[in-house]
Amino acid sequence: MSSLLHLFVLIPLAGFIISLFIPKKQESLISWTVFGIVGLHFIGSVGFFILWMLCGHPTLNLKDIALYSTDNYEFLVDFYFDKITAVYLFVGAFLTFLVTVYSRRYLHREPGYKRFFNTILLFYFGYNITIFSGNFETLFIGWEILGICSFLLIAFYRDRYLPVKNAYKVFSVYRIGDVGLILAMWASHHLWHENITFLKLSNAELVHEHLSSHSLIGVFISLMILIAAAAKSAQLPFSSWLPRAMEGPTPSSAIFYGSLSVHIGVFLLLRTFPFWENQISVRILIVILGLLTSVVATLTARVQSTIKSQIAYSSVAQIGLIFIEVAIGFEKFALFHFAGNAFLRTYQLLVSPSSVSYLIREQFYNFVPRKQTIENSLPRKIQNSIYMLSVKEWNLDSFMNRVLWTPLNRAGKKLDFLTIKRLLLFFIPTYMIGLFVLYRHLPMPAEVHEYLPTIFSLIGLITVLKAFSERKNVVMSWIMIIMNHFWMALAISFNEDFTYNQVYLYLSGVVVAGIVGYLCVRRLKRLEGSIDLNQFYGHSYEHPKIAFVFLLSCLGLTGFPITPTFIGEDVIFTHIHEDQAVLALFTSLSFIVDGIALVRIYARVFLGPHVKTYHETAYRSS
Protein backbone atom coordinates (compact mmCIF):
# COMPACT_ATOMS: atom_id res chain seq x y z
CA MET A 1 0.00 0.00 0.00
CA SER A 2 2.89 2.38 0.74
CA SER A 3 4.07 2.20 -2.86
CA LEU A 4 0.78 3.79 -3.99
CA LEU A 5 1.75 7.04 -2.28
CA HIS A 6 3.94 7.89 -5.29
CA LEU A 7 0.87 8.15 -7.51
CA PHE A 8 -0.64 11.06 -5.59
CA VAL A 9 2.46 13.14 -6.30
CA LEU A 10 3.18 11.87 -9.82
CA ILE A 11 -0.32 12.32 -11.27
CA PRO A 12 -0.46 16.14 -10.81
CA LEU A 13 3.18 16.42 -11.95
CA ALA A 14 2.43 14.45 -15.12
CA GLY A 15 -0.64 16.62 -15.75
CA PHE A 16 1.42 19.79 -15.31
CA ILE A 17 4.10 18.62 -17.77
CA ILE A 18 1.47 17.57 -20.35
CA SER A 19 -0.40 20.88 -20.04
CA LEU A 20 2.78 22.83 -20.80
CA PHE A 21 2.87 21.43 -24.35
CA ILE A 22 -0.78 22.15 -25.21
CA PRO A 23 -1.21 25.29 -27.38
CA LYS A 24 -2.79 28.12 -25.43
CA LYS A 25 -5.56 28.56 -28.02
CA GLN A 26 -6.82 25.01 -27.41
CA GLU A 27 -9.09 25.90 -24.49
CA SER A 28 -11.16 22.76 -24.73
CA LEU A 29 -8.11 20.47 -24.79
CA ILE A 30 -6.53 22.32 -21.84
CA SER A 31 -9.68 22.16 -19.72
CA TRP A 32 -10.38 18.50 -20.51
CA THR A 33 -6.78 17.54 -19.74
CA VAL A 34 -6.85 19.27 -16.36
CA PHE A 35 -10.35 17.96 -15.67
CA GLY A 36 -9.21 14.41 -16.44
CA ILE A 37 -6.02 14.63 -14.34
CA VAL A 38 -7.72 16.14 -11.30
CA GLY A 39 -10.72 13.80 -11.68
CA LEU A 40 -8.43 10.77 -11.83
CA HIS A 41 -6.63 11.99 -8.74
CA PHE A 42 -9.93 12.49 -6.89
CA ILE A 43 -11.20 9.00 -7.78
CA GLY A 44 -7.86 7.51 -6.78
CA SER A 45 -7.97 9.39 -3.46
CA VAL A 46 -11.42 8.06 -2.63
CA GLY A 47 -10.41 4.51 -3.60
CA PHE A 48 -7.19 4.68 -1.58
CA PHE A 49 -9.05 6.11 1.41
CA ILE A 50 -11.54 3.20 1.38
CA LEU A 51 -8.72 0.64 1.02
CA TRP A 52 -6.81 2.32 3.85
CA MET A 53 -9.85 2.17 6.15
CA LEU A 54 -10.52 -1.49 5.31
CA CYS A 55 -6.90 -2.33 6.23
CA GLY A 56 -7.35 -0.81 9.69
CA HIS A 57 -6.08 2.74 8.81
CA PRO A 58 -2.38 2.01 9.47
CA THR A 59 0.28 4.73 9.56
CA LEU A 60 2.34 4.48 6.37
CA ASN A 61 5.90 5.70 5.92
CA LEU A 62 7.86 5.44 2.68
CA LYS A 63 11.52 6.43 2.49
CA ASP A 64 11.73 7.18 -1.18
CA ILE A 65 15.09 8.53 -2.27
CA ALA A 66 18.13 10.32 -0.83
CA LEU A 67 18.81 13.32 -3.09
CA TYR A 68 22.10 14.08 -1.35
CA SER A 69 24.03 12.36 1.41
CA THR A 70 27.34 12.70 3.27
CA ASP A 71 28.77 11.04 6.35
CA ASN A 72 26.66 13.16 8.71
CA TYR A 73 23.92 14.54 6.48
CA GLU A 74 21.19 13.13 4.24
CA PHE A 75 18.58 15.04 2.25
CA LEU A 76 15.87 12.41 2.16
CA VAL A 77 12.53 12.51 0.34
CA ASP A 78 10.12 10.77 2.70
CA PHE A 79 6.37 10.18 2.32
CA TYR A 80 3.99 9.75 5.23
CA PHE A 81 0.28 8.92 5.48
CA ASP A 82 -1.97 9.02 8.53
CA LYS A 83 -5.37 10.44 9.47
CA ILE A 84 -4.15 14.04 9.13
CA THR A 85 -2.96 13.38 5.58
CA ALA A 86 -6.17 11.47 4.82
CA VAL A 87 -8.39 14.44 5.74
CA TYR A 88 -6.23 16.94 3.86
CA LEU A 89 -6.07 14.61 0.85
CA PHE A 90 -9.84 14.13 0.61
CA VAL A 91 -10.66 17.81 1.13
CA GLY A 92 -7.95 18.91 -1.30
CA ALA A 93 -8.90 16.41 -4.01
CA PHE A 94 -12.61 17.21 -3.85
CA LEU A 95 -12.24 21.00 -3.77
CA THR A 96 -9.59 21.07 -6.51
CA PHE A 97 -11.87 18.98 -8.71
CA LEU A 98 -14.80 21.30 -7.94
CA VAL A 99 -12.81 24.46 -8.68
CA THR A 100 -11.46 22.93 -11.89
CA VAL A 101 -14.97 22.24 -13.15
CA TYR A 102 -16.04 25.75 -12.17
CA SER A 103 -13.03 27.41 -13.84
CA ARG A 104 -13.47 25.72 -17.21
CA ARG A 105 -16.27 28.12 -18.13
CA TYR A 106 -15.63 30.93 -15.67
CA LEU A 107 -12.31 31.76 -17.38
CA HIS A 108 -13.56 31.14 -20.92
CA ARG A 109 -11.67 33.34 -23.43
CA GLU A 110 -9.47 34.75 -20.70
CA PRO A 111 -6.01 35.56 -22.19
CA GLY A 112 -4.30 33.67 -19.35
CA TYR A 113 -6.50 30.56 -19.60
CA LYS A 114 -3.62 28.13 -20.09
CA ARG A 115 -1.42 29.94 -17.58
CA PHE A 116 -4.14 29.61 -14.93
CA PHE A 117 -4.56 25.86 -15.33
CA ASN A 118 -0.81 25.27 -15.53
CA THR A 119 -0.41 27.07 -12.21
CA ILE A 120 -3.32 25.19 -10.64
CA LEU A 121 -1.70 21.85 -11.54
CA LEU A 122 1.67 23.04 -10.21
CA PHE A 123 -0.06 24.16 -7.01
CA TYR A 124 -1.80 20.81 -6.66
CA PHE A 125 1.54 19.04 -7.14
CA GLY A 126 3.08 21.15 -4.36
CA TYR A 127 0.04 20.63 -2.13
CA ASN A 128 0.31 16.86 -2.38
CA ILE A 129 4.05 16.93 -1.66
CA THR A 130 3.32 19.01 1.44
CA ILE A 131 0.56 16.84 2.91
CA PHE A 132 2.38 13.58 2.11
CA SER A 133 5.73 14.82 3.44
CA GLY A 134 7.41 12.59 5.98
CA ASN A 135 10.11 15.05 7.09
CA PHE A 136 10.85 18.77 7.06
CA GLU A 137 12.94 18.60 3.88
CA THR A 138 10.14 17.05 1.82
CA LEU A 139 7.60 19.42 3.33
CA PHE A 140 9.80 22.38 2.41
CA ILE A 141 9.76 21.33 -1.27
CA GLY A 142 5.96 21.54 -1.36
CA TRP A 143 6.00 24.65 0.84
CA GLU A 144 8.13 26.55 -1.69
CA ILE A 145 5.97 25.45 -4.63
CA LEU A 146 2.84 26.71 -2.86
CA GLY A 147 4.52 30.06 -2.27
CA ILE A 148 5.47 30.74 -5.89
CA CYS A 149 2.08 29.51 -7.14
CA SER A 150 0.41 32.00 -4.80
CA PHE A 151 2.46 34.81 -6.29
CA LEU A 152 1.65 33.76 -9.87
CA LEU A 153 -2.10 33.42 -9.28
CA ILE A 154 -2.50 36.67 -7.34
CA ALA A 155 -0.65 38.41 -10.19
CA PHE A 156 -2.77 36.54 -12.76
CA TYR A 157 -4.05 39.84 -14.16
CA ARG A 158 -0.47 40.87 -14.69
CA ASP A 159 -1.25 43.94 -16.78
CA ARG A 160 -2.86 45.63 -13.76
CA TYR A 161 -1.02 47.49 -11.03
CA LEU A 162 -2.79 46.32 -7.85
CA PRO A 163 -2.69 42.53 -8.47
CA VAL A 164 1.06 42.69 -9.10
CA LYS A 165 1.71 44.91 -6.09
CA ASN A 166 -0.36 42.71 -3.78
CA ALA A 167 1.24 39.54 -5.13
CA TYR A 168 4.62 40.99 -4.22
CA LYS A 169 3.35 41.85 -0.71
CA VAL A 170 2.03 38.33 -0.16
CA PHE A 171 5.26 36.74 -1.35
CA SER A 172 7.22 38.98 1.03
CA VAL A 173 5.21 37.65 3.99
CA TYR A 174 5.54 34.08 2.72
CA ARG A 175 9.30 34.55 2.62
CA ILE A 176 9.29 35.19 6.37
CA GLY A 177 7.48 31.88 6.86
CA ASP A 178 10.01 30.15 4.58
CA VAL A 179 12.93 31.29 6.69
CA GLY A 180 11.09 30.33 9.88
CA LEU A 181 10.89 26.81 8.51
CA ILE A 182 14.55 26.87 7.42
CA LEU A 183 15.65 27.89 10.92
CA ALA A 184 13.46 25.15 12.44
CA MET A 185 15.19 22.64 10.15
CA TRP A 186 18.61 24.05 11.11
CA ALA A 187 17.96 23.71 14.83
CA SER A 188 16.44 20.24 14.31
CA HIS A 189 19.68 19.03 12.70
CA HIS A 190 21.57 20.01 15.84
CA LEU A 191 18.94 18.57 18.19
CA TRP A 192 18.53 15.17 16.51
CA HIS A 193 21.86 14.98 14.61
CA GLU A 194 19.86 13.70 11.63
CA ASN A 195 17.01 14.69 9.33
CA ILE A 196 14.26 13.66 11.70
CA THR A 197 11.15 12.06 10.19
CA PHE A 198 7.62 12.76 11.42
CA LEU A 199 7.29 9.05 12.21
CA LYS A 200 10.15 9.31 14.71
CA LEU A 201 8.75 12.61 15.94
CA SER A 202 5.60 10.81 17.10
CA ASN A 203 7.73 8.71 19.47
CA ALA A 204 7.05 10.41 22.82
CA GLU A 205 9.99 8.76 24.60
CA LEU A 206 12.48 9.84 21.94
CA VAL A 207 11.21 13.43 21.95
CA HIS A 208 11.26 13.63 25.76
CA GLU A 209 14.79 12.20 25.89
CA HIS A 210 16.16 14.89 23.55
CA LEU A 211 14.20 17.83 24.94
CA SER A 212 15.03 17.09 28.57
CA SER A 213 18.62 18.21 28.00
CA HIS A 214 17.99 20.71 25.18
CA SER A 215 14.84 22.53 26.26
CA LEU A 216 15.99 25.92 24.89
CA ILE A 217 16.57 24.51 21.39
CA GLY A 218 13.17 22.82 21.60
CA VAL A 219 11.44 26.12 22.38
CA PHE A 220 13.32 27.82 19.53
CA ILE A 221 12.23 25.15 17.04
CA SER A 222 8.62 25.43 18.22
CA LEU A 223 8.67 29.23 17.87
CA MET A 224 10.09 29.02 14.35
CA ILE A 225 7.38 26.50 13.42
CA LEU A 226 4.77 28.87 14.86
CA ILE A 227 6.15 31.81 12.83
CA ALA A 228 6.03 29.71 9.65
CA ALA A 229 2.48 28.53 10.40
CA ALA A 230 1.27 32.02 11.32
CA ALA A 231 2.69 33.56 8.13
CA LYS A 232 1.16 30.85 5.93
CA SER A 233 -2.25 30.92 7.65
CA ALA A 234 -2.48 34.73 7.98
CA GLN A 235 -2.43 34.89 11.77
CA LEU A 236 -1.35 38.01 13.66
CA PRO A 237 0.63 40.03 12.83
CA PHE A 238 0.53 38.72 9.23
CA SER A 239 -3.26 38.77 8.76
CA SER A 240 -3.45 41.72 6.36
CA TRP A 241 -2.03 39.80 3.38
CA LEU A 242 -5.07 37.53 2.93
CA PRO A 243 -7.55 40.18 1.64
CA ARG A 244 -4.80 41.47 -0.69
CA ALA A 245 -4.51 37.96 -2.11
CA MET A 246 -8.10 38.20 -3.33
CA GLU A 247 -6.92 40.28 -6.32
CA GLY A 248 -6.57 37.03 -8.28
CA PRO A 249 -9.41 35.25 -10.09
CA THR A 250 -12.29 34.01 -7.94
CA PRO A 251 -11.48 30.28 -8.46
CA SER A 252 -7.88 30.74 -7.31
CA SER A 253 -9.09 32.77 -4.33
CA ALA A 254 -11.41 29.90 -3.43
CA ILE A 255 -8.88 27.10 -3.63
CA PHE A 256 -5.92 29.03 -2.21
CA TYR A 257 -7.17 31.51 0.35
CA GLY A 258 -10.50 29.98 1.19
CA SER A 259 -9.71 26.31 1.52
CA LEU A 260 -6.29 24.71 0.97
CA SER A 261 -3.20 26.92 1.01
CA VAL A 262 -4.36 29.07 3.91
CA HIS A 263 -4.80 25.94 6.08
CA ILE A 264 -1.26 24.64 5.51
CA GLY A 265 -0.15 26.46 8.66
CA VAL A 266 -2.69 24.37 10.59
CA PHE A 267 -1.28 21.26 8.92
CA LEU A 268 2.23 22.19 10.07
CA LEU A 269 1.07 22.56 13.67
CA LEU A 270 -0.84 19.27 13.55
CA ARG A 271 2.10 17.42 12.04
CA THR A 272 4.59 18.75 14.61
CA PHE A 273 2.21 18.57 17.61
CA PRO A 274 4.02 15.55 19.19
CA PHE A 275 7.16 17.69 19.36
CA TRP A 276 5.75 20.69 21.25
CA GLU A 277 2.77 19.18 23.10
CA ASN A 278 4.72 19.12 26.40
CA GLN A 279 5.98 22.71 25.99
CA ILE A 280 3.27 24.49 27.96
CA SER A 281 4.61 27.97 27.22
CA VAL A 282 4.41 27.36 23.47
CA ARG A 283 0.86 25.99 23.74
CA ILE A 284 -0.23 29.05 25.74
CA LEU A 285 1.38 31.32 23.14
CA ILE A 286 -0.50 29.57 20.31
CA VAL A 287 -3.80 29.91 22.20
CA ILE A 288 -3.21 33.62 22.81
CA LEU A 289 -2.21 34.16 19.16
CA GLY A 290 -5.28 32.29 17.88
CA LEU A 291 -7.62 34.13 20.26
CA LEU A 292 -6.28 37.58 19.38
CA THR A 293 -6.45 36.78 15.67
CA SER A 294 -10.05 35.56 15.95
CA VAL A 295 -11.19 38.69 17.79
CA VAL A 296 -9.36 41.15 15.51
CA ALA A 297 -10.37 39.35 12.29
CA THR A 298 -14.03 39.06 13.35
CA LEU A 299 -14.27 42.78 14.12
CA THR A 300 -12.50 43.63 10.87
CA ALA A 301 -14.73 41.34 8.79
CA ARG A 302 -17.88 43.06 10.06
CA VAL A 303 -16.96 46.45 8.60
CA GLN A 304 -15.53 45.36 5.24
CA SER A 305 -17.18 46.86 2.17
CA THR A 306 -16.29 44.06 -0.25
CA ILE A 307 -17.59 40.51 -0.06
CA LYS A 308 -14.19 38.89 -0.70
CA SER A 309 -12.58 40.83 2.14
CA GLN A 310 -15.40 39.79 4.46
CA ILE A 311 -14.87 36.14 3.57
CA ALA A 312 -11.09 36.48 3.92
CA TYR A 313 -11.21 37.88 7.44
CA SER A 314 -13.95 35.44 8.45
CA SER A 315 -11.69 32.59 7.33
CA VAL A 316 -8.77 34.08 9.30
CA ALA A 317 -10.95 34.19 12.41
CA GLN A 318 -11.91 30.53 12.05
CA ILE A 319 -8.29 29.50 11.49
CA GLY A 320 -7.42 31.31 14.71
CA LEU A 321 -9.94 29.08 16.48
CA ILE A 322 -8.40 26.01 14.81
CA PHE A 323 -5.00 27.10 16.16
CA ILE A 324 -6.54 27.11 19.64
CA GLU A 325 -8.03 23.64 19.13
CA VAL A 326 -4.68 22.25 18.01
CA ALA A 327 -2.89 23.82 20.99
CA ILE A 328 -5.45 22.39 23.42
CA GLY A 329 -5.00 18.95 21.89
CA PHE A 330 -8.34 18.55 20.10
CA GLU A 331 -6.76 17.08 16.96
CA LYS A 332 -9.87 15.39 15.56
CA PHE A 333 -12.02 18.42 16.20
CA ALA A 334 -9.43 20.64 14.49
CA LEU A 335 -9.48 18.38 11.41
CA PHE A 336 -13.28 18.47 11.32
CA HIS A 337 -13.20 22.25 11.73
CA PHE A 338 -10.65 22.56 8.91
CA ALA A 339 -12.83 20.54 6.54
CA GLY A 340 -15.94 22.53 7.40
CA ASN A 341 -14.21 25.90 7.05
CA ALA A 342 -12.60 24.87 3.74
CA PHE A 343 -15.90 23.73 2.21
CA LEU A 344 -17.78 26.79 3.44
CA ARG A 345 -15.23 29.37 2.28
CA THR A 346 -14.87 27.71 -1.12
CA TYR A 347 -18.64 27.82 -1.59
CA GLN A 348 -18.86 31.44 -0.43
CA LEU A 349 -16.08 32.60 -2.74
CA LEU A 350 -17.41 30.73 -5.78
CA VAL A 351 -20.89 32.21 -5.38
CA SER A 352 -19.68 35.66 -4.32
CA PRO A 353 -19.98 37.22 -7.83
CA SER A 354 -23.56 35.94 -8.10
CA SER A 355 -24.40 37.04 -4.56
CA VAL A 356 -23.35 40.60 -5.28
CA SER A 357 -25.38 40.62 -8.47
CA TYR A 358 -28.54 38.98 -7.08
CA LEU A 359 -28.68 40.58 -3.64
CA ILE A 360 -27.54 44.12 -4.36
CA ARG A 361 -31.13 45.40 -4.28
CA GLU A 362 -31.80 43.66 -0.96
CA GLN A 363 -28.55 45.04 0.47
CA PHE A 364 -29.58 48.61 -0.26
CA TYR A 365 -33.33 48.57 0.23
CA ASN A 366 -34.33 45.67 2.47
CA PHE A 367 -31.50 45.61 5.00
CA VAL A 368 -32.62 46.01 8.59
CA PRO A 369 -29.84 46.15 11.22
CA ARG A 370 -30.17 44.20 14.43
CA LYS A 371 -31.70 46.19 17.26
CA GLN A 372 -29.27 44.91 19.87
CA THR A 373 -25.61 43.90 19.41
CA ILE A 374 -22.72 43.18 21.75
CA GLU A 375 -21.06 46.46 20.83
CA ASN A 376 -24.05 48.49 22.06
CA SER A 377 -23.22 47.53 25.64
CA LEU A 378 -19.84 49.28 25.37
CA PRO A 379 -19.25 53.00 25.97
CA ARG A 380 -19.63 55.14 22.86
CA LYS A 381 -15.92 56.11 22.71
CA ILE A 382 -14.85 52.47 22.84
CA GLN A 383 -17.40 51.58 20.15
CA ASN A 384 -16.07 54.31 17.86
CA SER A 385 -12.45 53.37 18.55
CA ILE A 386 -13.07 49.70 17.72
CA TYR A 387 -14.95 50.71 14.58
CA MET A 388 -12.15 52.97 13.32
CA LEU A 389 -9.48 50.39 14.12
CA SER A 390 -11.47 47.73 12.28
CA VAL A 391 -11.99 49.97 9.26
CA LYS A 392 -8.23 50.55 9.15
CA GLU A 393 -7.70 46.79 9.62
CA TRP A 394 -5.98 47.49 12.94
CA ASN A 395 -3.11 49.15 11.04
CA LEU A 396 -1.55 45.73 10.39
CA ASP A 397 -0.19 46.84 7.01
CA SER A 398 1.51 49.91 8.44
CA PHE A 399 2.81 47.84 11.36
CA MET A 400 4.48 45.38 8.98
CA ASN A 401 5.94 48.25 6.96
CA ARG A 402 7.22 49.99 10.07
CA VAL A 403 8.75 46.90 11.65
CA LEU A 404 10.08 45.03 8.60
CA TRP A 405 10.20 46.77 5.24
CA THR A 406 10.95 50.38 6.22
CA PRO A 407 14.09 49.44 8.22
CA LEU A 408 15.29 47.31 5.30
CA ASN A 409 14.72 50.16 2.84
CA ARG A 410 16.50 52.65 5.10
CA ALA A 411 19.45 50.32 5.55
CA GLY A 412 19.62 49.81 1.81
CA LYS A 413 19.44 53.53 1.00
CA LYS A 414 22.40 54.19 3.27
CA LEU A 415 24.37 52.01 0.87
CA ASP A 416 23.80 54.32 -2.11
CA PHE A 417 27.52 55.08 -2.16
CA LEU A 418 28.08 51.57 -3.52
CA THR A 419 28.52 51.52 -7.29
CA ILE A 420 29.70 48.80 -9.63
CA LYS A 421 33.12 50.48 -9.82
CA ARG A 422 33.48 50.55 -6.03
CA LEU A 423 32.30 46.95 -5.86
CA LEU A 424 35.05 45.94 -8.23
CA LEU A 425 37.62 47.91 -6.23
CA PHE A 426 36.69 46.66 -2.76
CA PHE A 427 34.41 43.62 -2.56
CA ILE A 428 35.93 41.47 -5.28
CA PRO A 429 39.59 41.88 -4.07
CA THR A 430 38.42 41.20 -0.51
CA TYR A 431 36.61 38.08 -1.68
CA MET A 432 39.65 36.86 -3.60
CA ILE A 433 41.84 37.35 -0.54
CA GLY A 434 39.34 35.34 1.50
CA LEU A 435 39.41 32.54 -1.08
CA PHE A 436 43.21 32.54 -1.10
CA VAL A 437 43.40 32.26 2.69
CA LEU A 438 40.75 29.50 2.66
CA TYR A 439 42.33 27.29 0.02
CA ARG A 440 45.90 27.82 1.25
CA HIS A 441 44.88 27.14 4.86
CA LEU A 442 47.01 30.05 5.99
CA PRO A 443 47.51 30.23 9.78
CA MET A 444 45.71 32.97 11.67
CA PRO A 445 44.82 33.75 15.30
CA ALA A 446 41.89 31.73 16.63
CA GLU A 447 40.06 34.92 17.63
CA VAL A 448 40.20 36.23 14.06
CA HIS A 449 39.13 32.91 12.56
CA GLU A 450 36.16 32.75 14.93
CA TYR A 451 34.72 36.07 13.73
CA LEU A 452 35.46 35.70 10.00
CA PRO A 453 32.22 33.75 9.16
CA THR A 454 30.09 36.42 10.83
CA ILE A 455 31.99 39.23 9.09
CA PHE A 456 31.68 37.60 5.67
CA SER A 457 27.98 36.87 6.19
CA LEU A 458 27.45 40.51 7.19
CA ILE A 459 29.10 41.64 3.95
CA GLY A 460 26.74 39.29 2.08
CA LEU A 461 23.77 40.80 3.91
CA ILE A 462 24.96 44.30 2.97
CA THR A 463 25.12 43.37 -0.71
CA VAL A 464 21.60 41.93 -0.77
CA LEU A 465 20.23 44.96 1.15
CA LYS A 466 21.71 47.14 -1.58
CA ALA A 467 20.04 44.93 -4.20
CA PHE A 468 16.71 45.25 -2.37
CA SER A 469 16.82 49.06 -2.27
CA GLU A 470 18.33 49.63 -5.74
CA ARG A 471 16.00 51.71 -7.93
CA LYS A 472 18.04 52.56 -11.02
CA ASN A 473 20.31 49.79 -12.24
CA VAL A 474 18.70 46.35 -12.77
CA VAL A 475 22.03 44.75 -13.66
CA MET A 476 23.64 46.01 -10.47
CA SER A 477 20.80 44.66 -8.33
CA TRP A 478 21.11 41.28 -10.05
CA ILE A 479 24.89 41.13 -9.57
CA MET A 480 24.52 42.08 -5.90
CA ILE A 481 22.16 39.13 -5.31
CA ILE A 482 24.64 36.73 -6.94
CA MET A 483 27.47 38.17 -4.83
CA ASN A 484 25.39 37.61 -1.69
CA HIS A 485 25.31 33.87 -2.37
CA PHE A 486 29.08 33.78 -2.90
CA TRP A 487 29.72 35.65 0.36
CA MET A 488 27.44 33.25 2.23
CA ALA A 489 29.29 30.27 0.77
CA LEU A 490 32.64 31.81 1.81
CA ALA A 491 31.36 32.55 5.33
CA ILE A 492 30.19 28.98 5.92
CA SER A 493 33.39 27.57 4.38
CA PHE A 494 35.40 29.37 7.06
CA ASN A 495 33.03 28.16 9.76
CA GLU A 496 34.11 24.53 9.79
CA ASP A 497 36.12 22.04 7.78
CA PHE A 498 34.07 20.09 5.22
CA THR A 499 34.36 19.03 1.60
CA TYR A 500 34.07 21.81 -0.94
CA ASN A 501 31.69 19.66 -3.00
CA GLN A 502 28.89 20.89 -0.75
CA VAL A 503 29.70 24.52 -1.56
CA TYR A 504 29.94 23.67 -5.25
CA LEU A 505 26.51 22.05 -5.04
CA TYR A 506 25.12 25.24 -3.51
CA LEU A 507 26.78 27.60 -5.99
CA SER A 508 26.16 25.50 -9.11
CA GLY A 509 22.54 26.56 -9.37
CA VAL A 510 23.46 30.14 -8.45
CA VAL A 511 26.02 30.43 -11.25
CA VAL A 512 23.76 28.96 -13.96
CA ALA A 513 20.68 30.94 -12.91
CA GLY A 514 22.76 34.11 -12.48
CA ILE A 515 24.27 33.91 -15.97
CA VAL A 516 20.93 33.12 -17.65
CA GLY A 517 19.18 35.95 -15.80
CA TYR A 518 21.95 38.40 -16.70
CA LEU A 519 21.66 37.48 -20.38
CA CYS A 520 17.89 37.99 -20.22
CA VAL A 521 18.32 41.49 -18.78
CA ARG A 522 20.95 42.41 -21.39
CA ARG A 523 18.73 41.12 -24.18
CA LEU A 524 15.76 43.09 -22.87
CA LYS A 525 17.82 46.28 -22.61
CA ARG A 526 18.86 45.92 -26.24
CA LEU A 527 15.21 45.56 -27.27
CA GLU A 528 13.62 48.14 -24.98
CA GLY A 529 16.40 50.56 -24.08
CA SER A 530 16.77 51.83 -20.54
CA ILE A 531 15.16 49.81 -17.70
CA ASP A 532 15.04 50.80 -14.07
CA LEU A 533 13.16 49.62 -10.97
CA ASN A 534 11.13 52.76 -10.28
CA GLN A 535 7.94 51.48 -11.89
CA PHE A 536 6.22 48.43 -13.39
CA TYR A 537 7.01 47.99 -17.08
CA GLY A 538 4.93 44.93 -18.02
CA HIS A 539 7.45 43.62 -20.55
CA SER A 540 5.99 40.09 -20.30
CA TYR A 541 3.24 41.30 -22.65
CA GLU A 542 5.66 41.86 -25.54
CA HIS A 543 8.46 39.48 -24.49
CA PRO A 544 6.79 36.46 -22.86
CA LYS A 545 9.68 34.07 -23.59
CA ILE A 546 12.26 36.32 -21.96
CA ALA A 547 9.91 36.80 -19.01
CA PHE A 548 9.50 33.04 -18.56
CA VAL A 549 13.24 32.32 -18.71
CA PHE A 550 13.98 35.19 -16.33
CA LEU A 551 11.36 33.86 -13.88
CA LEU A 552 13.11 30.48 -13.92
CA SER A 553 16.40 32.26 -13.24
CA CYS A 554 14.87 34.10 -10.28
CA LEU A 555 13.54 30.81 -8.91
CA GLY A 556 16.95 29.22 -9.30
CA LEU A 557 18.65 32.04 -7.39
CA THR A 558 16.08 32.06 -4.62
CA GLY A 559 16.52 28.36 -3.88
CA PHE A 560 13.37 27.02 -5.53
CA PRO A 561 13.46 23.19 -5.94
CA ILE A 562 14.49 23.23 -9.61
CA THR A 563 18.24 23.64 -9.01
CA PRO A 564 20.81 22.10 -6.62
CA THR A 565 20.80 25.40 -4.72
CA PHE A 566 17.64 24.23 -2.95
CA ILE A 567 19.51 21.31 -1.39
CA GLY A 568 22.63 23.43 -1.00
CA GLU A 569 20.85 25.96 1.22
CA ASP A 570 19.89 23.22 3.65
CA VAL A 571 23.39 21.74 3.52
CA ILE A 572 24.94 25.15 4.20
CA PHE A 573 22.74 25.69 7.25
CA THR A 574 23.85 22.39 8.79
CA HIS A 575 27.38 23.83 9.11
CA ILE A 576 26.21 26.72 11.31
CA HIS A 577 26.75 25.70 14.93
CA GLU A 578 23.96 25.88 17.46
CA ASP A 579 25.79 28.57 19.45
CA GLN A 580 26.23 30.83 16.40
CA ALA A 581 22.95 32.72 16.63
CA VAL A 582 24.33 35.87 14.95
CA LEU A 583 25.63 33.92 11.95
CA ALA A 584 22.29 32.10 11.64
CA LEU A 585 20.46 35.44 11.87
CA PHE A 586 22.56 37.10 9.14
CA THR A 587 22.24 34.05 6.88
CA SER A 588 18.48 33.78 7.32
CA LEU A 589 18.01 37.54 6.79
CA SER A 590 20.03 37.23 3.58
CA PHE A 591 17.71 34.49 2.33
CA ILE A 592 14.62 36.59 3.22
CA VAL A 593 15.83 39.73 1.46
CA ASP A 594 17.31 37.69 -1.40
CA GLY A 595 13.94 36.18 -2.35
CA ILE A 596 12.06 39.46 -1.95
CA ALA A 597 14.61 41.37 -4.06
CA LEU A 598 14.44 38.78 -6.85
CA VAL A 599 10.65 38.80 -7.03
CA ARG A 600 10.73 42.60 -6.93
CA ILE A 601 13.00 42.70 -9.98
CA TYR A 602 10.78 40.28 -11.88
CA ALA A 603 7.58 42.11 -10.92
CA ARG A 604 8.94 45.57 -11.77
CA VAL A 605 10.46 44.60 -15.10
CA PHE A 606 7.97 42.10 -16.49
CA LEU A 607 4.61 42.66 -14.74
CA GLY A 608 2.22 45.58 -14.43
CA PRO A 609 0.61 47.86 -17.06
CA HIS A 610 2.23 47.28 -20.43
CA VAL A 611 1.00 50.36 -22.30
CA LYS A 612 4.03 52.28 -23.58
CA THR A 613 3.95 55.97 -24.42
CA TYR A 614 6.49 55.58 -27.21
CA HIS A 615 4.18 53.38 -29.29
CA GLU A 616 2.61 54.96 -32.34
CA THR A 617 -0.73 56.55 -31.51
CA ALA A 618 -3.54 57.51 -33.90
CA TYR A 619 -4.50 61.13 -33.32
CA ARG A 620 -7.21 61.23 -35.99
CA SER A 621 -9.97 58.92 -37.04
CA SER A 622 -9.57 57.21 -40.41
Image (cartoon, grey):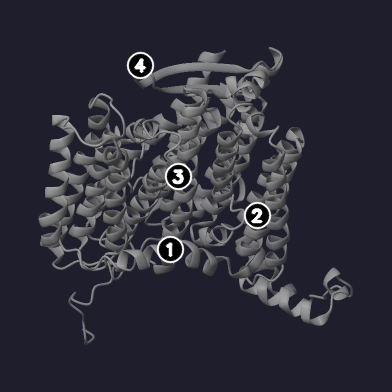
In the drawing, what numbered circle is on residue 405? 1
Residue 440 visible in rendering: yes
Q: Answer above or below: position of 524 versus 214.
A: below
What amino acid is labelled 1 in the image? Trp
Q: How many marks?
A: 4
Q: Which residue is mark 3?
A: 179
Q: Are the residues tagged 4 and 2 within 8 Å (C-beta)?
A: no
Q: Which residue is mark 4?
A: 71
Badge number at residue 190 = none
Alpha-carbon span between mark 1 and mark 2: 23 Å
For residue 250, above or below residue 534: above
Instruction: Residue type at mark 2: give it.
Output: Val
Residue where numbered disc 2 is placed: 316
Gap in angstroms between the C-alphas marked 4 and 2 = 44 Å
Crowd around label 1: few <14 · some 14–19 · many ≥20 (10 Å): some
Quadrant in which residue 45 is drawn: top right
Q: Earlier in the sequence, mark 4 or mark 1?
A: 4
- Residue 470, given in percent of the width and then of the height, sits at 27, 64
- Camera-near label (4 vs 3) is 4
Whole-Å distance between the Cαs marked 4 and 3? 26 Å
Mark 2 element type: helix
